[in-house]
Image (cartoon, grey):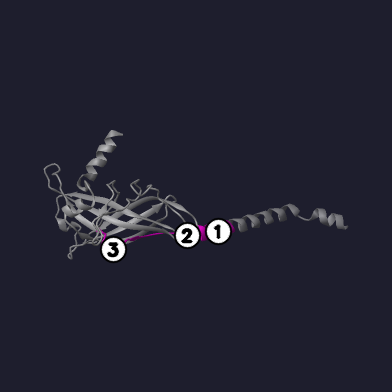
Amino acid sequence: MDLWSLVTAFPWRSLLDVSALILSIVNGFMLFRSYVRDRPRLSVKPVYPEVYQWFFKLPSEPFEGQPTTKFGFLAYLDILNRGLRDVTCDAWNLCLQKPDGGKVGPLNPLSIVEPRILLGKSTMPKTYPVLGQRGEFSTGEMMVKSGDSISGFAYYIFEYVGGTESTVIRSDGTVMGNVIVTDIFGKSASEKIVFREITLDRARSLVTGIENADAEMERKLQDQ
């Protein structure tokens, strides 16, 4: 058999198919490696956890003749992106941990007036942003750039029929929660938060009209 016959008889098509398969596997591996390396990596934590994480009892109305109990939860959060790609946060929810091991939630954040807090001996209160909400010093943008962070308050309400206040309050008077931040790709990060009780009057001094936040939300939904 001469050289030309050997060349034409060689299974070049099969070799090309195998080469194309190997190349596609290598390319897929490189793309996956690039995604894993560059993907956004969110983390969330409470800002000054001993100071700014509060809960308080809200006025409540009976439901079908049964008493109800309502609590408000005000958290000051910092969301950090440790990855190499910018990413937008899609949700920031709160789950409460009952003393008996059960869970409540996830609770969705409600719109509130920006908190105004007096610091030290200052007579001029500082205005704080609310996550996802346009305000005096905030655009409400929830994109977290690579190596950057955003911070702001989030407000949640938990209401239940019957029961006692100890449903979520622990023996030391605190409430344990878990905040969960989810990006637009469905990846989530979570962190525990310990809420300490303040009076409703104190909450009102921080956020104007905070006791009516849920009613205001319902009114806006009905107007849509």
Using the image, determine if residue 217 lies above or below residue 178: above
Q: Name the residue under label 1.
A: 34
**Label 1 secondary element:** helix
Q: Quadrant of the N terminus?
A: bottom right
- The residue sitting at 28% across, 61% down in the picture is 193
In the rendered image, residue 2, in percent from the top left (x then y), is placed at: 88, 57
| Magenta span | 30-53
Using the image, determine if residue 206 lies above or below residue 82: above
Q: Name the residue under label 3.
A: 49
Q: In this view, does 202 lie to the left or right of 156?
A: left
- The residue sitting at 39% across, 53% down in the picture is 182
In the rendered image, residue 32, in percent from the top left (x then y), is placed at: 55, 57
Q: In this view, does 185 lie to the left or right of 14?
A: left
User: Mark 1 against mark 3, which lies toward the viewer?
Assistant: 3
Q: Name the residue under label 2.
A: 83
In the rendered image, residue 120, in percent from the top left (x then y), is placed at: 24, 62
Q: Can residue 5 be seen in this view?
A: yes
Circles 2, 1 touching at the beta carbon (< 8 Å): no
| Distance between the alpha carbons at the discs numbered 2 and 3 | 24 Å
Most foreground residue, 171 or 42: 42
> In the image, what residue type sits under mark 3?
Pro
Outermost residue on the right side: it is 2
- Magenta includes 143? no
Category of crowding for the residue at label 2, using alpha-carbon neighbours closer than 10 angstroms: few (below 14), some (14–19), many (at least 20): some
Lower sequence index among marks 2 and 3: 3
